[in-house]
């Protein structure tokens, strides 16, 4: 039970670091990395509780989250590259060029 508590604490710390990164960073790449930390914290929680409760569907869902995170990273980097080509900046607060 102690190992599970430690892993949930690690997952909570990852989630808090991710939220802090999203709220405080100005660079679009840093925000993207912070979102990845949040997704990794959710994945870790699914694996922890899936193993503790003996539920293999939770671990299968964790694999789905990993695939979703890879797609999110590819699309996010494509948007950031497009932003840099059009606006010559990667700062999130200067991204007014994307407004339609």
Image: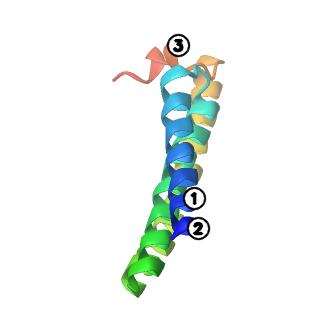
How far across and down, in percent of the image, does residue 12 sit? 49, 48
Does 65 sit left or right of 40 as displayed?
left
Q: Which of marks 2 and 3 is in front?
A: 2
Q: Residues within 10 Å of mark 3 (few under 14, many from 20)?
A: some
**Above or below: residue 85 compared with residue 2:** above
Of tags 3 and 1, the one toward the viewer is: 1
Q: How far apart are marks 2 and 3 (CA)?
A: 44 Å
Q: Residue 6 carries which label?
A: 1
Label 2, residues with CA under 10 Å away: few <14, some 14-19, many ≥20: few
Judging by the rendered image, the residue that carries numbered circle 3 is 94
- Which residue is tagged 2? 3
Instruction: Report the side of 95 relative to 91 (left or right).
Output: left
Secondary structure beneath disc 2? Answer: helix
Asked if the residue at tag 2 contacts the one at tag 1, i.e. Cβ–Cβ closer than 8 Å, the answer is: yes
Tell me the CA gap for discs 1 and 2: 5 Å
User: Splitting the image into 4 quarters, where does residue 7 fall?
Assistant: bottom right
Rendered location of residue 73, percent (x, y): 58, 50
| Rendered location of residue 69, percent (x, y) | 52, 57
Going 56% across and 30% down the picture, which residue do you hit? 21
- C-alpha distance separating marks 3 and 1: 40 Å
Q: In this view, does 92 lie above or below 21?
A: above
Question: Front-most of 15 and 37?
Answer: 15
Kindly indicate whether the residue at mark 3 contacts the one at mark 2 (C-beta within 8 angstroms). no
């Amino acid at each position: 039970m102690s190992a599970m508590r430690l892993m949930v604490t690690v997952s909570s710390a990852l989630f808090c670091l991710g939220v802090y990164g999203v709220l405080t960073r100005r660079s679009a790449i840093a925000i993207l990395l912070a979102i990845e930390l949040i997704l990794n914290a959710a994945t870790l929680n699914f694996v922890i509780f899936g193993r503790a409760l003996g539920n293999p569907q939770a671990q299968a869902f964790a694999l789905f989250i990993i695939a979703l995170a890879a797609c999110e990273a590819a699309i996010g980097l494509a948007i950031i590259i497009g932003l840099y080509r059009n606006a010559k900046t990667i700062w999130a607060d200067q991204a007014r060029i994307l407004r339609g």
